[in-house]
Image (tube, rainbow, N blue to C red):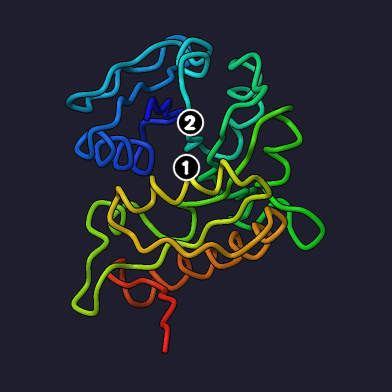
């Protein structure tokens, strides 16, 4: 796939590197003046150019930057957009929830995009190495679009996670709360743990 990753921090950089290893074409979309991402095998371009030429766009920026980068992309019509963000606001609390979600707000802003929510319920360390003694970590994802579901499932597998489709995009409301639980628990037990779906 041709993948545009917007955001080259811990999450975007780790995912981008994993997809390069899996054989995908990865281009990082950079804001004006942003540092060139040091990801071997990946290229960079303006956000608009990266999105224009991509089959799938992965959004991995801080919540405060979301409106700016979505606007900078230009047209989202028909693009598959995988939202990895968490709407963390002042006081390290969720800025939205219960009646909407960051994923739904991304879909509202990126008009015409086919939005999926994934890669937001665990840390970048687990993205770099999603394998434990019991097997691969589960990665929950949700979307309203069948094509976005198929593409996101493949990208999840290519990182090394076990994809678990949860249902429609509105379930992002619960994913984002689960992410805050994971983040909060790292203060007690560190980062080397994961939530898993266990099947009988």
Query: What secondary structure is found at the residue carrying circle 1?
Result: helix
Residue 183, given in percent of the width and then of the height, sits at 46, 64
Circle 2 packing at 10 Å, graded few (<14), some (14-19), many (20+), is many
Query: What secondary structure is found at the residue carrying circle 2?
Result: strand
Task: Write the residue at 38% across / 69% down.
Answer: 186
Of the numbered discs 1 and 2, the one sitting upstream in the chain is: 2
Residue 163 in the figure: left or right of residue 95: left
**Could you tell me which quadrant the C terminus lies in?**
bottom left
**Residue 122 in which image quadrant:** bottom left
| 46 over 21 or under it: above or below | above
Which mark, residue 151?
1
Residue 128 in the figure: left or right of residue 197: left
Task: Write the residue at 61% across / 35% down.
Answer: 64
Task: Evaluate if marks 1 and 2 touch, with contact meaning CB atoms under 8 Å apart.
Answer: yes
Circle 1 packing at 10 Å, graded few (<14), some (14-19), many (20+), is some
Residue 72, given in percent of the width and then of the height, sits at 60, 15
Which mark, residue 56?
2
Q: Report, in whole angstroms, how far the alpha carbon at label 1 lies from the one at label 2.
A: 8 Å
User: Which mark lies nearer to you, 1 or 2?
Assistant: 1
| 37 over 172 or under it: above or below | above
**Could you tell me which quadrant the N terminus lies in?**
top left
């Amino acid at each position: 796939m041709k993948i545009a990753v917007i955001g080259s921090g811990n999450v975007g950089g780790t995912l981008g590197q994993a997809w390069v290893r899996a054989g995908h074409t990865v281009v990082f979309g950079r804001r004006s003046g942003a540092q060139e991402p040091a990801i071997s095998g990946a290229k960079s371009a303006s956000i608009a150019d990266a999105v224009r030429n991509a089959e799938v766009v992965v959004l991995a920026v801080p919540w405060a930057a979301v409106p700016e980068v979505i606007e900078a992309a230009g047209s989202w019509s028909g693009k598959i957009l995988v939202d990895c963000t968490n709407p963390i606001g002042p006081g390290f609390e969720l800025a939205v929830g219960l009646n909407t979600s960051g994923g739904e707000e991304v879909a509202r802003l990126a008009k015409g995009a086919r939005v999926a929510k994934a890669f937001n319920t665990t840390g970048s360390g687990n993205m770099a190495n999603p394998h434990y003694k019991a097997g691969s970590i589960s990665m929950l994802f949700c979307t309203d679009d069948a094509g976005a579901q198929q593409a996101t499932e493949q990208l999840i597998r290519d990182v090394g996670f076990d994809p678990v489709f949860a249902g429609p995009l509105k379930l992002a409301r619960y994913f984002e709360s689960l992410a805050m639980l994971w983040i909060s628990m790292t203060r007690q037990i560190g980062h080397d743990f994961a939530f898993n779906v266990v099947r009988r």
